[in-house]
Amino acid sequence: MQFEFNSGILKTASYPIMDKAVTEMKKDPSVKFVLNGNASAEGTDAHNMALSVERATAVKTYLVNSGISADNLVVKGYGDKKPVADNSTEAGRVRNRRVEIKKM
C-alpha cells in the first residue's frame, strides 16, 4: 500500500489491493498479521518513525472497518530503516512510502 509524501492517508489507488488482502485474510480468521509501516528518508528519524506507525495504523483501520479482527493485527513502524528502493531518487522514495502485510 502506498502513501503520499509526509502523509499517513492511504492512497485511494491502494483500495483494490486492500480489498484483495481483506478477501484473503477472511479465509482463515485465526491467522495473525503484522503491518510493517515504512517511510522514505526525508525528515528526521523521529518523524519518519511516527509517520511509519501512522501509515500502518491507517491500514489497520481499513482492515478492521472491512471486518478483520483488530486482535489479529499488529502494527510496527520502521521509519526509513528498511528501504526497498534507492532514497536518492523520487521514484525510490515513492516505493519506500509503504505498508507491508505479513503473516506472523
Image (cartoon, rainbow, N blue to C red):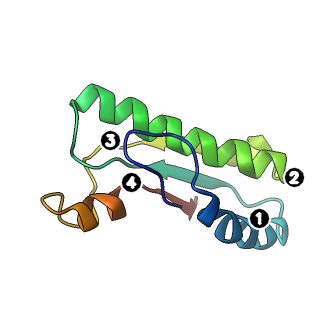
Whichever of callouts 1 and 2 sits on the residue coming sooner in the sequence is 1
Q: Nearer the viewer, residue 89 or 39?
A: 89
Which of the labelled discs sits on residue 67, or is there none? 2
Cβ atoms at labels 4 and 2 below 8 Å apart: no
Dot 4 amino acid type: Arg
| Mark 1–mark 2 CB contact (< 8 Å) | yes
**Label of residue 22 in the image:** 1
Q: CA distance from mark 1 to mark 2?
A: 8 Å
Circle on res. 79: 3
* Dot label at residue 97: 4
Secondary structure under the numbered disc 2 in the rendered image: loop
Spatial distance from mark 2 to mark 3, Cα to Cα? 28 Å
Q: Under tag 1, what secondary structure?
A: helix
Q: Is residue 35 above or below residue 43?
A: below
Local crowd at mark 4 within 10 Å, few (<14), some, or many (≥20)? Answer: many
Could you tell me which residue is drawn at 44 percent across and 56 percent down? 98
